Image (cartoon, grey):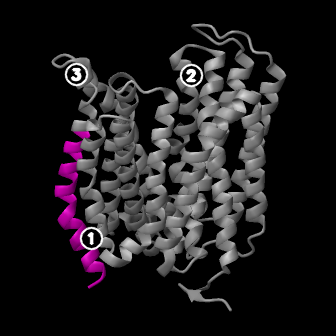
Amino acid sequence: MLRHFQGRAALPRSVFFRFVTASGMTNLADGVATVAWAWLASLLTRDPLLISMVPVALRLPWFLFALPAGLVADRMDRRMLILAMDGIRTLAFAAAALIIWAALPLAPPPESGVSQPVLYWGIMLAALSVGIAEVFRDNAAQTMLPSIVPHAELERANGRLWSVELVGNALVGPALGAFLLTVALPLPFAANALAYLGAVWLILRIAGRFRPEAHAERNWRRELGEGFAFLRDAPLLRLLAWLTGFWNLFFQMMLIGLVLHVQENLGMSAAAYGLVLAGGAVGGILGGYLGDGIVRRLGPGRTAQWMLASSAPVFLAIALAPGPLTLCLALAVFEFTGIVWNTVSVSYRQRTIPDNLLGRVNSLYRLLAWGMMPVGLLLSGLVVRGAEGVLTRDLALLMPFIVAAFGAALLTLFGWRALGAGFGARHS
């Protein structure tokens, strides 16, 4: 017997299982691709700028297409949009595998320029296609979830979803990608094509209509204005967007600083670093499974306050960790609190925004969150460069963590009372 929520019949739990499994397969492919794209680029050129252009092609679409993705998600059936985008990624990875296979054996990579321009630009085009499809797919999936589970269960559903995603993206995917590369260079790309094809098959098995109801004649300027107006008039949602954006800025400062810190200050190998990151992902997985229970016990406002307050001391703990084990534990706590924060903020967003506006407002929210990331990347390098003028190299490499901790402390002072008041008003 179907339950009812938000005026809509709830779907069987098998639908949520298929939805989560499909997301797990796509995130496993994303984890494999994290290693495969950069590794392949390094075999075509030793120019760091040309190598970096491949991940730029993957991430640039978030800045260019986040708003159009929101408009599209509010205009068409979100299930069909997911199917189309996963289909594009299937074809893109299959094409990448074929052009790599056709180009073998590869010539030695030059210090400048590329050894095989046709392969390089083919890979760039494939990466850009994957990146564009990811923007539309991820927005559609996040806006489709409230139509699959009751709103009262969104914290639990999001926690389970993120746990599965972290297993694929951070634990299994990168290691699997590295192994497949040692077997055959085209293999990780071919495997990804099969993973996305499997996700398409699972989403095809979800029956139902997931198109939001249109309340007026379609006009993209008016529709985008409605999204801006809703976010403008929702103070708690706007607060969560700003807090998440600045938190992401500090996170990126820490993440870039961490790479140099573990290499130069802790003397860790790439393999050890990978294991430490995997340990941190375990904390995120636990946060996904325990987050809904924490929210039920403390309430969303108190949970958000404590997760935000934990950021500053955890940034310091990561900087001061004397070795791999303590660093792993600090990262696990960091990932745990971050996922629990997301459990509160994303569930509130999905529950609060009307279904016919969810795609647009969600895309505006995520544009702010992702838009702060390159600022954090830039600040990290500037902080280290400036600190090297007055400090030794080892201390200069710690400064991004110190600045991030200080910023997170200020963010907590700013957000603590506002979060309590905002969620308190919602429940009064």
Q: Which residue is mark 3?
A: 386
Q: CA distance from mark 2 to mark 1?
A: 44 Å
Kindly indicate whether the residue at mark 3 contacts the one at mark 1 (C-beta within 8 angstroms).
no
N-terminal label among 1 and 3: 1
- Number of other residues with Cα within 10 Å of mark 1, as a class: few under 14, some 14 to 19, many 20 or more: some
Q: What secondary structure is marked by label 1?
A: helix
Image location (x, y in percent) of residue 400:
27, 33
Q: CA distance from mark 1 to mark 3?
A: 38 Å
- Residue bounds of the magenta highlight: 403-428
> Left or right of 54: which side holds 90?
right
Q: Is residue 128 magenta?
A: no
Location of residue 239 (image quadrant): bottom left
Residue closer to the observer: 122 or 31: 31
Query: What's the magenta bit mostly, secondary-structure-wise?
Result: helix
Q: CA distance from mark 2 to mark 3?
A: 26 Å
Q: Nearer the viewer, mark 1 or mark 3?
A: 1
Q: Is residue 124 above or below residue 163?
A: above
Q: Which mark is residue 403?
A: none
Q: Nearer the viewer, mark 2 or mark 1?
A: 1
Q: Which residue is mark 2?
A: 51
Q: What secondary structure is marked by label 3?
A: helix
Please, what is the three-letter code of the amino acid marked with disc 1? Arg
Please, what is the three-letter code of the amino acid marked with disc 2? Ile
Location of residue 9 (image quadrant): bottom right
Q: Is residue 60 above or below residue 183?
A: below
N-terminal label among 2 and 1: 2
- Number of other residues with Cα within 10 Å of mark 3, as a class: few under 14, some 14 to 19, many 20 or more: few
> Left or right of 160: which side holds 374?
left
